[in-house]
């Protein structure tokens, strides 16, 4: 087995390798080449710093040539491990450990201060491996879903005189950069910047000075994604519910996916009031690279 | 209606799973259609109006939940059962099936002995 940079391969080859590493996962999340490219662009994946493990006894072009893959996103002083996986037969040969060591080295060489990752809650072997490598748990994150459905008629925020304003993309990006709670890598302002062509923002003002909030989200043909809600004034849950209500009123036929809301986020009851549920959870972890 | 007049659409990206289900259902003479991703599945469902849709949840473009949600909004497909085929844990899949309007779920890996009867049951209730 040998570790080589992911930039050695085409996106087609990396997509094929990624899908093969996940073929037996409970939640496999396969990708097309177009989706992996979008992922690379949105999350600042640095392919030169990302790693593959190759089977040096196989020939390039053979299906099993790449037997492991780990991608490294890089932003400012931090890096993020993603799409980490090893094909089933190579898991007991130490390929996962080699891959992690290569990613840690790539992070250290580039002098990033923090290295982030997420692991699906309940994947204890992976969680313990990351702990042994010096990662510590920071928080639990929820992956939320909401199928297209009628708006609830009885939410208390439905009042006469609610005003809704459209925000420009630059206004949205400025506000995203000022969020109070640190977003997870997927929802950092850099991610929104990369999808700004599909970005929408609205501001919602409740009557009689009862509150004000805004939302930003990415929209494609079938889905609303990356839905961020912030409350500027008023009761956190009531205003967030009003904002979410307006978002879904504008896109009633779309399926909604929001990844990585912190489990203790005070706006979670507002999402629930609008029909969101948590489909699964991830554990976010970080390693302080100054600690070796 | 005989089996040969019944159309089953299987939306699944994994070729091994498509081959397996093709073999398991082969002798029952259904008309089997396949789609390798969500968008192809949507287009095929609209064009062919199958009698049953078997849906993998982990698809490479849009996942099975989103595709099911879109199919459920199409009047032409009203009453067509959509069945999730997935390895998701039971507690999570139950919620997903209910919320996304699936008519049921068959766990992966499928039981090749009982799978034809499970499929036939969904066709009866269609």
Image (spheres, rainbow, N blue to C red):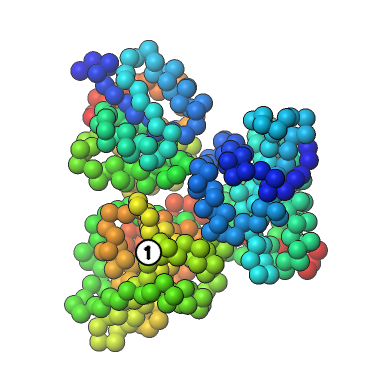
Residue at the (45%, 44%) spot, across then down? B61
Q: Nearer the viewer, residue A270 or A88?
A: A88
Residue A244 visible (yes or no) = yes
Q: Residue B31: x and y, percent?
A: 31, 20
Residue at the top extreme, as displayed: B27
The outermost residue toward the bottom is A209
When asked about the image quadrant of residue A208, the answer is bottom left
Residue A262 is situated, as x and y percent measured from the top left of the image, at 51, 65
Residue drawn at point x = 63 percent, y = 66 percent:
A75
Q: Is residue A92 left or right of residue A120?
A: right
Tag 1: Cα neighbours inside 10 Å, few (<14), some, or many (≥20)? many
Q: Residue at x 25, y 46 (%)?
A: B73
Query: Considering depth in this image, is A209 or A60 the residue closer to the camera?
Result: A60
Is B123 situated above or below B96?
above
Secondary-structure class at tag 1 = helix
| Rendered position, A136 above or below B26 | below
Which residue is labeled 1 in the image?
A: A271
Quarter residue A151 falls in:
bottom left
Measured from the top left, where is residue A175 in percent x and y?
A: 46, 77
Residue A96, image x and y in percent?
A: 72, 44
Residue shown at the point (51%, 63%) measured from the top left = A194
Could you say which is closer to the camera, residue A31 or residue A262? A31
Which quadrant of the figure contains the C terminus of chain A? Answer: bottom right
């Amino acid at each position: 087995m040998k570790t080589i940079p992911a930039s050695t391969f085409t996106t087609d080859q990396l997509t094929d390798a990624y899908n093969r590493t996940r073929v037996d996962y409970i939640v496999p999340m396969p990708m097309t080449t177009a989706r992996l490219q979008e992922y690379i662009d949105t999350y600042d994946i640095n392919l030169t710093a990302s790693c593959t493990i190759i089977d040096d006894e196989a020939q390039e072009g053979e299906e099993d040539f790449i037997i492991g893959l780990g991608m490294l996103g890089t932003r400012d002083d931090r890096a993020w491990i993603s799409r980490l996986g090893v094909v089933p037969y190579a898991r007991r040969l130490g390929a996962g450990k080699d891959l992690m060591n290569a990613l840690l080295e790539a992070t250290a060489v580039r002098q990033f201060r923090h290295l982030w990752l997420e692991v699906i809650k309940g994947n204890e072997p992976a969680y313990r491996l990351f702990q042994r490598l010096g990662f510590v748990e920071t928080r639990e994150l929820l992956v939320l879903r909401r199928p297209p459905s009628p708006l609830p008629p009885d939410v208390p925020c439905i009042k006469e005189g609610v005003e809704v304003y459209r925000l420009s993309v630059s206004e949205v990006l400025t506000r995203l950069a000022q969020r109070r709670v640190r977003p997870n890598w997927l929802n950092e302002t850099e991610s929104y910047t990369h999808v700004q062509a599909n970005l929408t923002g609205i501001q919602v003002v409740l009557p009689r000075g009862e509150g004000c909030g805004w939302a930003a989200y990415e929209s494609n043909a079938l889905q609303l994604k990356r839905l961020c809600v912030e409350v500027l004034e008023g009761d956190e849950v009531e205003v967030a519910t009003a904002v979410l209500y307006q978002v879904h009123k504008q896109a009633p036929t779309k399926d909604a996916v929001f990844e990585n809301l912190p489990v203790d986020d005070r706006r979670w009851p507002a999402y629930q009031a609008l029909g969101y549920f948590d489909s699964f959870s991830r554990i976010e972890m970080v390693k302080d690279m100054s600690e070796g | 209606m005989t089996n040969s007049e019944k159309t089953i659409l299987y939306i699944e990206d994994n070729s091994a799973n498509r081959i397996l289900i093709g073999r398991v259902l082969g002798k029952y003479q259904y008309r089997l259609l396949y789609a390798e991703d969500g968008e192809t599945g949507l287009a095929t469902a609209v064009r062919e109006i199958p009698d049953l849709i078997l849906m993998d949840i982990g698809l490479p473009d849009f996942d099975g939940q989103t595709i099911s949600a879109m199919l459920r909004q199409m009047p032409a497909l009203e009453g067509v059962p959509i069945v999730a085929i997935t390895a998701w844990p039971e507690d999570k899949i139950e919620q997903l099936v209910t919320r996304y309007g699936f008519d049921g779920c068959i766990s992966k890996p499928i039981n090749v002995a009982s799978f034809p009867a499970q499929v036939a049951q969904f066709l009866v209730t269609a």
